[in-house]
Image (cartoon, helix red, strand yellow):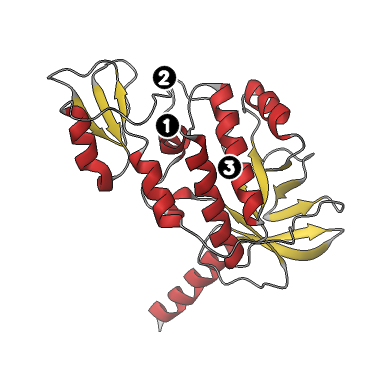
Amino acid sequence: MKKFFLLIVLLIVINEFSSYPILSENKIIGHIYTDLKANINKNELNGYILSLNQIDPELCYLAIGSVNNFELIENLFLDIGTELKNKNFDFVIFGNLKTLNKETTDYLNYIGKSPYLISEVLYRMIRGFETAGIVPVLKITSDDDTKVKNSLKNRAGAIYTYSEEINNLDMYLKNNNVYLKKDRILRLPWKTETSFLKDSIKSIYENSIILSGWRKDNSKLLYRKINFTETKMITYFSHSVESLAKEVLDGKKLATGKITW
């Protein structure tokens, strides 16, 4: 009986913190979810806080930022957006506007060190989501890079914003409620029917194999790891492309991605 009671309490806690009610003019008009598998009410306004490893366990911002072909990035987020739209989500909260540096520990969550690369990647993500009929909402923090914000504004124009620490944006989280400005429209009337998500993810991994410095006989193969001081490293982001990474290590193929740190 005690185990059953604890299970019920756990389920209540999980449910409570896997979504946040959206308030507009003191009325609940929808929810923002942190779990892609959540049961949602399609008659409400539904948002999702993007977790890339819920899309694919190995997917990360650093891999995406390492891809040379921006069209592949846009296609990936078109497909992610299509999947979200088919699950009855209306908008997605995403992004990291901070720059990568030598002190960064969670580097897989960063796009790179260049503000202009970050803004270009985020812009492609925005375009992909919008094409799929999903409203893109950027997650803002107090220590975002100003150059990233300015560059992105020049590329994309006005963008919806969300924060968990700044209260004067389009949406902000406070006391486990999300407050929405009443004049913000977070639905788009179109959708794309077909998703090629698995192929798009595969293309990201195949095109983000990075050579740091010149390849030599003592080069090392790194899985989802980077090194700021040593060169002669081959970095790859998925076990599915390990054989390709080894070919780059052996000099049989050229690296496909770019170093972003």
Residue extending farthest left: 217
Q: Amino acid at mark 2?
A: Lys
Provide the secondary structure element on which disc 3 rests: helix
Q: Is residue 119 positioned above or below 23 on the image?
A: above
Reading the chain from its start, which is encountered first: label 3 or label 1?
Answer: 1
Mark 2 residue crowding within 10 angstroms, few (<14) / some (14–19) / many (20+): few
Q: Which residue is mark 2?
A: 102
Q: Foreground residue, 157 or 13?
A: 157
Q: Is residue 80 positioned above or below 239 on the image?
A: below
Q: Amino acid at mark 3?
A: Met
Q: Which residue is mark 3?
A: 125
Q: Foreground residue, 237 or 27?
A: 237
Q: Residue 79, how many percent across, how many down?
A: 52, 54
Label 1 to label 2, Cα distance in Å?
A: 17 Å
Specify whether residue 92 is in view. Answer: no
Task: Tell me where residue 249 sits by quadrant.
Answer: top left
Q: Residue 60, how many percent across, how many down?
A: 43, 42
Q: Residue 49, how many percent across, how many down?
A: 58, 52
Q: Which residue is mark 1?
A: 66
The residue shown at (45%, 38%) is: 64
Q: Amino acid at mark 1?
A: Ser
Q: Is residue 12 left or right of residue 55?
A: right
Mark 3 residue crowding within 10 angstroms, few (<14) / some (14–19) / many (20+): many
